[in-house]
Image (cartoon, grey):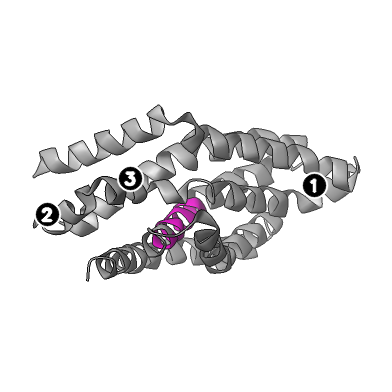
């Protein structure tokens, strides 16, 4: 049983490592986007610092759109998805591992990079720490919504999935931005609590929704 889940983790990790575009693509896209914002808004430090939270969160959301099609598509194309569904193994744990691998390769590097790029946007150090906390709480939500979009669009293009993901991710994005902007007052803890609660309740609901969407393709 454990061997099955370890092999799932190992196989998905190999897929990401063998296709450099699957994890390098979001990083390059994020860096290009972050670099372009100062060109658009000018070099006003106060203005960039005020917009930094929104710039980083929106850039990470858009960068994540490049990777969600990799979560289930490979298994669907080679037929292993059908075998997993009939294997009797815990599909919830299987899907959780696949989403975690996607988050690990697509979002985790962006979190660390965003901390450094936040200083380029003149975000204060205290706000940058809050940025890191909100991203650790928020990016798994983005990955789960991306997985749901990927499960719903196995036979369709990435554009369809992206149009599904963006509206669903807006609450997490808004909470993350509000938390960073409130780093100097007590409202900060309220927004972080809401974001943590959003993550807590999203895990069972979104993973179950992913499995339901996948099963629809085989009925």
Q: Secondary structure at mark 3?
A: helix
**Which residue is label 1 attached to?**
49
Point out the tag, 1 or 2, that comes first from the N-terminus: 1
99 on left or right of 9? right
99 on left or right of 58? left
- Bin the neighbour count of mark 3 within 10 Å (Cα to Cα): few under 14, some 14-19, many 20 and up: some
Q: Secondary structure at mark 2?
A: loop
Find residue 68 and report its horizontal and vertical position in percent.
45, 51
Point out the tag, 3 or 1, that comes first from the N-terminus: 1
Point out the tag, 2 or 3, that comes first from the N-terminus: 3
Task: Report the magenta stretch's main SS.
Answer: helix
- Looking at the rendering, the stretch of residues picked out in magenta corresponds to 137-149
| Residue 136 visible in the current orientation | yes
- Bin the neighbour count of mark 2 within 10 Å (Cα to Cα): few under 14, some 14-19, many 20 and up: few
Which mark lies nearer to you, 2 or 3? 3
Find residue 127 and report its horizontal and vertical position in percent.
68, 47
Which mark lies nearer to you, 3 or 1? 3
Marks 3,1: beta carbons within 8 A: no
181 on left or right of 46? left
**Which residue is label 3 attached to?**
74
Find residue 69 and report its horizontal and vertical position in percent.
44, 50
* CA gap, disc 3 and disc 1: 41 Å
User: Which residue is painted at 74% across and 48% down in the image?
Assistant: 52
* CA gap, disc 1 and disc 2: 49 Å
**Which residue is label 2 attached to?**
89
Q: In the figure, 152 relative to 64: above or below?
A: below
Residue 163, quarter of picture: bottom right
| Residue 190 visible in the current orientation | no
Q: Pick the quarter of the image with the N terminus.
A: top left
* CA gap, disc 2 and disc 3: 19 Å
Q: In the figure, 109 relative to 132: above or below?
A: above
């Amino acid at each position: 049983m454990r061997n099955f889940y370890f092999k799932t983790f190992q196989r998905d990790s190999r897929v990401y490592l063998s296709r450099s575009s699957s994890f390098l693509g979001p990083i390059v896209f994020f860096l290009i986007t972050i670099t372009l914002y100062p060109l658009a808004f000018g070099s006003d430090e106060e203005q960039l610092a005020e917009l930094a939270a929104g710039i980083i969160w929106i850039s990470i959301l858009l960068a994540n759109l490049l990777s969600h099609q990799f979560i289930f598509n490979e298994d669907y194309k080679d037929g292993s998805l059908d075998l997993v569904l009939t294997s009797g193994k815990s599909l919830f744990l299987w899907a959780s591992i696949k989403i975690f691998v996607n988050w690990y390769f697509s979002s985790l590097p962006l979190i660390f990079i965003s901390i450094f790029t936040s200083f380029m946007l003149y975000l204060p150090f205290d706000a940058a720490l809050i940025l890191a906390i909100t991203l650790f709480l928020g990016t798994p939500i983005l990955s789960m919504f991306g997985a749901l979009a990927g499960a719903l669009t196995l036979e369709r293009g990435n554009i369809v999935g992206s149009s599904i993901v963006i509206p669903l991710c807006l609450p997490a994005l808004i909470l993350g931005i509000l938390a960073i902007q409130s780093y100097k007052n007590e409202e900060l803890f309220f927004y972080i609590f809401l974001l943590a609660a959003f993550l807590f309740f999203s895990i069972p609901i979104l993973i179950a929704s992913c499995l339901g969407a996948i099963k629809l393709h085989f009925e």
